[in-house]
Amino acid sequence: YSWPHNLYQVEFGNGIFVGVATGDTSPNPASSSKGSFFYTSLDGTNWTQRTYFDFGPAAFIHQFLVFLNGTFQELTDGGSQYGMVPISITSDGTSYTTKFAPTNAPNARSMAYGNGKYLLIEQSGKSWVSTDETNWVAEYGGFQNAFTQIIGGQSNLVAFGSGLPVLLSSDGLTFHAASNSPSGVLSAGAFDGTNYVGIGATAQLGHPITYIGEVYTSTN
């Protein structure tokens, strides 16, 4: 039996696209369920199935895939069922290693790397800092709103959240609002080495309520 394929997320780095998908049968002889695989592509059109990985979204809950510090990292939630929050790490999809996030971070939303530290953020302002993705130190970002994404910038970590201005941190421990940033609008962003791009939406009152997409750019 061949399971239907489900694609969860795709990221770009190291000159390739890497995606996380489930489908086919797990190569694990102890399991007859569908498996989790990394897929790669050079052009976004032609894809090749790569390595199977144990802690993927076939059995765990996909939270996010992110490219940082030269590797693709897939974080899945197995905290409530298995007592672990695995991070499956690969540079090119052909092999992987596993690290683990804190067990009390099942609702992790994003992770970034900067100044030699990994920063993991969760709902309600929770965050954890690590230099090796093995030993994590719990911190509090100073905001109780739900974080939605964090990215590494030129010299700062940049966080986005529900009802928040854009937040900046140099150490992953303390955050402050970026000057002139729109408040409560941006929910995600990206940095290409020179420019920041943030996206979000604002509600327009009416029947029904409509949402207008907005894009902001910044060089600092």
Image (spheres, rainbow, N blue to C red):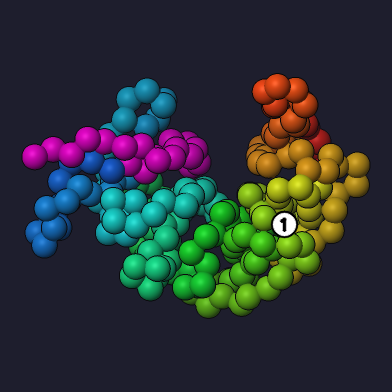
- In the rendering, at what x and y percent does residue 72 appear? 46, 50
Residue occupying the point 13% across, 38% down: 2
Give the tally of numbered discs.
Answer: 1
Where residue 145 appears, as percent x and y from the top left, is 72, 57
Front-lying residue, 130 or 176? 176
Type of amino acid at the residue the image marks with label 1 = Asn
Residue under the image location 23 percent in, 41 percent down: 23
Question: What residue sits 40% from the left and 40% below the top?
Answer: 8
Tell whether position 43 is magenta. no
Q: Which residue is mark 1?
A: 145
Q: Is residue 132 left or right of residue 90?
A: right
**Residue that sits furthest to the right in the current view:** 180
What stretch of residues is rendered in magenta?
A: 1-21
The answer to whether residue 213 is left or right of residue 111 is right
Magenta span dominant secondary structure:
strand
Q: Secondary structure at mark 1?
A: loop
Q: Is residue 179 above or below residue 42?
A: below
For residue 90, side relative to residue 131 (left or right):
left
Identify the residue at image location x=40%, y=30%: 42
Can see residue 210? no
